[in-house]
Amino acid sequence: MTDKIIKEAFQNNQEGFAEAFTDALGHKLQEALSDCKNRIAKELFEKTEEVTETDAFASIISECMTENIEVNLDLPNGERLHVTPDVASVLSETHDNLPKEMQQSFREMVFESKDKYTKILETIVTGEEQ
């Protein structure tokens, strides 16, 4: 393709040069777009955790924090949560500051549903019950 561009430029064929250049540019853009789509698709489906274990809270929180990664968490009801390292840190600190008798309830509720997860985070951030 670049040979054709150079040939057309040397022959002072502006129309041929423009066509060859446009074709080459379009091909490069298609390659870049395809690579970008593949990378995004891979990232979307890369890390998914299923909540089936009793210690899901500890494993999700510690994985986010120790590996500094974001985790997509599929709940049994079909909803998906996105847990970032910052959110994991806030949840961990809140959990550890609760009385022992409330920690189990907190662990069970936080990943019960997307609605509960959101309400708990809003309560932590605002300091007001929702």
Image (tube, grey):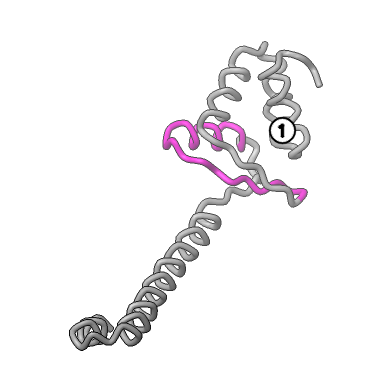
Instruction: In this rendered view, identify the residue nearer to me: 52 or 110.
Output: 110
Q: Residue 116 appears at what percent x and percent y?
A: 77, 32
On screen, residue 89 above or below 38: above
Provide residue 10's location: percent of width, then percent of height: 18, 84
In the structure shown, which secondary structural element does the residue marked by tag 1 occupy? helix
The one of 106 and 19 positioned closer to us in this rendering: 19
93 on left or right of 1: right
Report the magenta residues as a range: 56-77
* Viewer-nearest residue: 78 or 58: 78
Give the amino acid at mark 1.
Tyr
> Residue drawn at (74%, 52%), measured in percent from left and top?
78
The residue that disc 1 covers is: 117
* Quarter of the C terminus within the rendering: top right
Q: Is residue 95 magenta?
A: no
**Picture coordinates of residue 15 (x, y %)?**
35, 85
Q: Residue furthest left?
A: 10
The residue under the point 52% across, 61% down is 41
Q: Is residue 65 rendered magenta in the image? A: yes
Q: Which residue is drawn at the image coordinates 70% and 16% (left, top)?
A: 126
Q: How many marks?
A: 1
**Residue 82 image-quadrant placement:** top right
Indicate the quadrant where residue 18 lies: bottom left
